[in-house]
Amino acid sequence: MAFLTDRKRAIGLGAAKTGTDHFWSMTVSSVALLILVPLFIFTFGVALGRGHDEVLAFYSRPIPAVIAILTLAVGFHHFAMGARTMIEDYVHGLARKVAIIAVQCISYAAIAAAVFSIARIAL
């Protein structure tokens, strides 16, 4: 029978340094997505089924282009944070580091592609 304090049992199980920051950034991005996704659906729905030239003209306006860019950027950032949390919980060793780097790279590449694509349409 070991007589250990709660602190001694918790040592080595991880530090509670960035948990609150991560929670708040996930919460803020969730609230942003609650606002942005319906706006994106409404703006995308207007362009749905139209011809190529009409869609280009629609997304060359600033409001639909900004809504699309913000929705995709915040969405992929939220995805990266959530995927990182799952990887940290379930993957161990070198595979954890590789998976986290891969998820971050994929997420930032998707954000860059989305911003480039919509900027090219808008300009």
Image (tube, grey):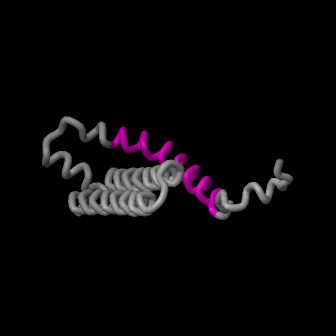
Residue at the image position 26 percent from the left and 63 percent from the top:
116
Q: Quadrant of residue 19?
A: bottom right
For residue 34: magenta?
yes
Taking the spot 21% from the left edge, 58% from the top edge, the residue there is 121
Q: Nearer the viewer, residue 19 or 72?
A: 19
Location of residue 35 with respect to 16 vertically, above or below: above
The x, y position of residue 106, in whole percent, is 33, 58
Judging depth in this view, the residue of 87 and 39 nearest the camera is 87
- The magenta segment: 18-43
Q: Let me know if residue 32 appears in the view.
A: no
Residue 62 painted magenta: no
Above or below 82: residue 102:
below
Count of labels in the image = 0
**Looking at the picture, how far across and down is residue 122, in whole percent?**
25, 59
Q: Is 3 left, or right, of 51 in this rendering?
A: right
In this image, 45 relative to 120: left or right?
right
Residue 45, x across and y down, in percent: 30, 37
Occupied quadrant, residue 103: bottom left
Tell me if 37 is positioned left or right of 109 in this view. Answer: right
Residue lying at the far front of the rendered structure:
1
Between residue 99 and residue 30, name the one nearer to us: 99
